[in-house]
Structures are given as structure tokens and as C-alpha cells.
Amino acid sequence: MDVTIRHTEPSDFEGVQSLYTQPSCYSGTLQLPYPSLSNWQARLANMGKDHYNLVALIDNQIVGQIGMIIMDNPRRKHVANIGMSVSHQLQNQGIGTQLLEAIIDLADNWLALKRIELEVYTDNPAAIALYKKAGFVIEGTAKNYAFRDGEYVDSHLMARLAQ
């Protein structure tokens, strides 16, 4: 399986929107069901200078996405937060690992970031294992972190310090 990782282009809005129509993708993130094309188009076309967004493609079709936002507070300019999703049919095939490795390389080797943070639902063992494999550690658990599918769910707060 040949996976290409590249920076998101404004023309990718349909592919990213399609990714987040999958229940596993919106329920595993803070996205809502029924994402609109216009919202994704505006979001991708108007990313700030401290926003980075990568996509994974197979045969020119978007199968994964990872976003990173560098904190704008001057005392936290060394910190970024990430979020990602991979197409349900292609999970556990290394695409998430490749996206994560690419964003970590960008953070560590090009942006001089010291810390990457993320939140992951406590009932997502595959994602937790992926993040741990990449050097993230659980720093705490946020109770009732988000409302998902009719109930409040907990989330682990994880972080990775640059080596």
C-alpha cells in the first residue's frame, strides 16, 4: 500500500469532509456528524500561520488527516496540540503512524517545538497505543471531557516532549 503524506491544500476540502462523515472519525474526535463542505472549505482555506494540516492519500484519495496548532500565548509558543483521524476501513495499517511521524518531524526538526499535546478518549485503546508508541505519555484524565453520542466521556491528556 503506497501512502503519500503531504500538506493539505484548499482543494482537499471534499476529501477531508468525506473522511469526517465516517462515524469512527467524528466520534473519535471533537468533530460533529454531518460536516458541511462549506465549513471544511473555509477551514482549510483560512488556516492561520501557526496551523499545520497534513493528509494521507492512497491513489489520490484522502484516507487520513492530522492537524497541529501551535499555541499563540507567548509563554507557550514551544507547545502545539494535535488531532487526527484515519478512514475506518484502513485503521491499524500504519497510516496513523505515518501521519504522526510526519507531524512530529515537522514539530521537532523544523518548528523547534518542545512539547506536543493531545486529548484522546479513554475508550480508544488503539489510538492510545499509537500515541504511546510515538513517545506520548498520559499526564492525566479529564472526566466528562466531551459529550458524545448522548453521554459524557472521559479523555486522557497526553503529551510528548522533544528528544
Image (cartoon, helix red, strand yellow):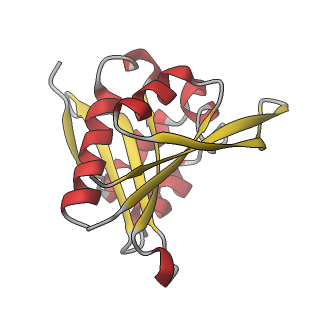
Q: Residue at x 48, y 61 (%)?
A: 43
Q: Residue at x 21, y 41 (%)?
A: 5
Residue 126 lies, with reference to residue 155, above or below; the image says: above
Percent position of residue 114, x then y: 35, 63
Counting every numbered tag in the picture gives 0
Percent position of residue 92, x then y: 37, 17
Residue 60 lies, with reference to residue 75, above or below; the image says: above
Quadrant where the image shows the N terminus: top left
Q: Is residue 162 left or right of residue 17?
A: left
Looking at this view, is 71 or 158 the one in front?
A: 158
Residue reaching furthest to the bottom: 74
Residue 18 lies, with reference to residue 106, above or below; the image says: above
Picture quadrant of residue 80: bottom left
Picture quadrant of residue 53: bottom left
Percent position of residue 144, x then y: 81, 41
Residue 7 lies, with reference to residue 87, above or below; the image says: below
Q: Residue at x 52, y 48 (%)?
A: 118
Residue 101 visible in the snapshot: yes
Percent position of residue 89, x then y: 42, 16
Residue 72 visible in the snapshot: no
Q: Is residue 53 left or right of residue 98?
A: right
Looking at this view, is 136 or 105 the one in front?
A: 136
